Image (cartoon, helix red, strand yellow):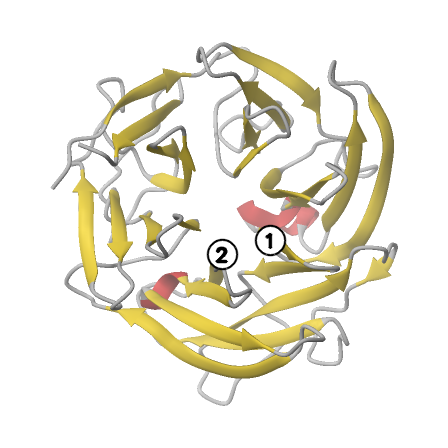
Amino acid sequence: MKKPELFLKLPEEYVCTPDGMEIDRNGNLILSCPNYAQDDMSGCIVRINRDKEVEKWFDVPVHPETKLARNMGIAFDRDWNLYICDNQGWSEKEEVLYKGRILKVTADEDGTIKETVVVADHMEHPNGIRIRGDYLYVTQSYLHPVKDPSGKLVSCVYRFRLDEHDVHITNTLEDPNILTTLITENPECQYGADGIAIDSKGDLYVGNFGDGTVWKITLNEDGTVKEKEIYARDPEELVSTDGMVFDDEGNLYIADFCANAIVKVDQNRTVKRLAQSPDTDGFDGGLDQPGEPIIWNGSLIASCFDLVTGPGKVNTRHEMPATMSEIKLDQ
C-alpha cells in the first residue's frame, strides 16, 4: 500500500472539520468546512493555491434560524456558481432537524458574495453533490420519515434542475425530486447514501455508506434512471463509502471513513485498499478519518474529518489542527 503524506495543517481560527472539495477555474483547490467539531464555529469555504497557501474564501451564508452554516459537499456549475449542501441536521439534534438546504452561491475572487439562492430547503441530511448537464444530484443519507417494512434505513438521491429554487422537500417518497432510494442492510451502521461521483460517460455512482457498497446508476438522456446495479463491494477491502472521485483512466477512489483508508476500484471493478492508517492525529500525514478524496496536480488529496468515534471506527478522538493527506499516485 502507498504511504500518505501530510498535505496541510489547516488554520485553527476558521477550520476544525474539513469535508467536500472542488477545483476552481484557476486550478485552486476549494475546501468546504462544516466545522461540526465546534458548536460556535460556522462553516466556511477555503481556497488553497498550488503553493499550498491557504485562505478563507468566504463564510457560507447562515441559516436564518440556526445562525450557522454546516456546508459539506460542493460542486461548481459551468458558470462557476458554487452549489453547497448545507447539512444542518448532521448532529441529529432535534433543534436542527429538517433545516438542511442546498444553496447556490455566486462569489467573486475576493470572497464577496454577489448572490445566494436557496435551491431546496427542509432537508434532513443533504451530503454529497455533483452536477451533470442541466441537473444537480444530491445524496441524502437519512430519510427517516420513510419506513421500510424491514425496519432498515432508507436514504435517497435527489435530482434538481440547475434553474430550480425554493423547492420545499418533504422527506417522503412523494417528493418529485427523488431520483432513487437505497436501503442500508448493515444493522451495525445505519447510514445511507453518501459519496457521489460521475464517470466520463455521465453515469452516476453512489456509495451506500453503511453497507460499504457502490451503486452504479445509468441515466437516460433526460437524467432519469435507466438502470441501477451494485458496482463495487468487498467487505475485506471496503468498509464504508464516503466521498468518491474518478481519475482520467476511469479508476474510482473512495474515502473509507470508518477504516481510515483510501480504496481504489479499477476499471475491472477490482476493489483494493490503496492506503490505510491506524488511529492517528494526522500530523504526519496519516489518514485521520478521510471524508473526501480529489485528484489534484497528480496526487490524491484527502480531507480528514476526524470527528466520529465509536464501534466500527478506527478514529478514537478529535485533535486540532485539522489536517489533509496526500497520496502521490505516480510513485
Return the x and y of residue 10 as percentages of the image width and height.
Answer: 44, 16
Mark 2 or mark 1: whose residue is earlier in sequence: 1
Q: Nearer the viewer, residue 242 or 130?
A: 130
In the image, is residue 215 above or below residue 310? below
Q: Can you tell which quarter of the image residue 168 is in?
A: bottom right
| Quadrant including the N terminus | top left
Give the residue drawn at x 25%, y 68%: 268
Residue beneath disc 2: 197
Mark 2 falls on what kind of element? strand
Q: Nearer the viewer, residue 164 or 132?
A: 132
Secondary structure under tag 1 reads strand
Q: Position of residue 197 (x, y in %)?
A: 49, 56
Mark 1 neighbour density, 10 Å: few (under 14) some (14–19) many (20 or more) = many
Horizontal relation, residue 78 to residue 266: left or right: right
Labelled pair 2, 1 in contact (Cβ < 8 Å): yes
Q: Amino acid at mark 1?
A: Arg
Disc 1 marks which residue?
A: 130
Task: Say left or right for 293 vs 60.
Answer: left
Residue 162 drawn above or below residue 319: below
Residue type at mark 2 is Ala
Residue at left 60%, top 67%?
157
Is residue 316 toward the left or the right of residue 45 in the image?
left
Relative to 245, residue 184 above or below: below
Work out whether 88 lies above or below 303: below
Please tell me which residue is depicted at 63% across the width and 44% down the height of the picture.
75
**Residue 143's spot in the image, x, y percent?**
59, 68
